[in-house]
Image (cartoon, rainbow, N blue to C red):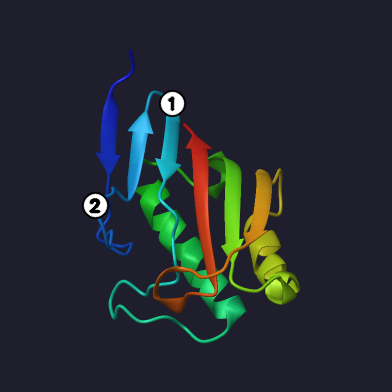
Amino acid sequence: MSSKKVISSPDAPQAVGPYSQGIRTGDFVFLAGQIPTIPATGQFPEGIAAQTEQVIANIKALLAAEGLTLANVVKASVFMADLAEFGAMNEVYAKHFASEPPARSTFQVAALPKAARVEIEVIARA
């Protein structure tokens, strides 16, 4: 049986409910969905492109806590408030996952926490 380790980073927004920022079990890291909260201010940047950049920055911070990078990501799930913004989100996403991008699913949802425009959760392998 694999052990379970809670992952946290002061460089990523703290969980806003009864959940962990991430969990490592064996060679896998599961991150909670990240919204575009700027850790220093608690605010969101304006616009879908800037929000996507911030979400990815938050993901990078949590992965770094385990010595990982975006290159370790094997699966991503993207949740969007409006798929009409897909192109702008995808442009930013593609910039960060240019080589061997992970498998991905993208969904439009009725609402996201704190009225975010985008949330991304990932699974990474060490």
x, y percent for residue 29: 42, 37
**Residue 33 drawn above or below residue 90:** above
How crowded pointer 1 is (Cα within 10 Å; few <14, some 14-19, many 20+) is rated as few
Q: Quadrant of residue 1?
A: top left
The residue type indicated by label 1 comes to: Asp
Q: Which mark is residue 13?
A: none
Q: Quadrant of residue 114?
A: bottom left
Tell me what residue is drawn at x 60 percent, y 42 percent: 75
x, y percent for residue 24: 35, 34
Q: Secondary structure at mark 2?
A: loop
Tell me what residue is drawn at x 67 percent, y 63 percent: 95
Alpha-carbon distance for marks 1 and 2? 24 Å
Is 24 left, or right, of 60 in this rendering?
left
- Which circle, 1 or 2, is nearer the viewer? 2
Q: Quadrant of residue 7?
A: top left
1 or 2: tag closer to the N-terminus:
2
Tell me what residue is drawn at x 48 percent, y 65 percent: 55
Residue corresponding to mark 1: 27
Toward the top, the furthest residue is: 1
How crowded pointer 2 is (Cα within 10 Å; few <14, some 14-19, many 20+) is rated as few
**Residue 105 drawn above or below residue 58:** above
Q: Secondary structure at mark 1?
A: loop
x, y percent for residue 33: 45, 55
**Residue 85 drawn above or below residue 94:** below
Toward the front, the furthest residue is: 110
x, y percent for residue 18: 24, 52
Tell me what residue is drawn at x 44 percent, y 66 percent: 35
**Residue 60 drawn above or below residue 3:** below
Q: Which mark is residue 18?
A: 2
Nearer to me, 106 or 49: 106
Nearer to me, 21 or 72: 21
The residue type indicated by label 2 comes to: Pro
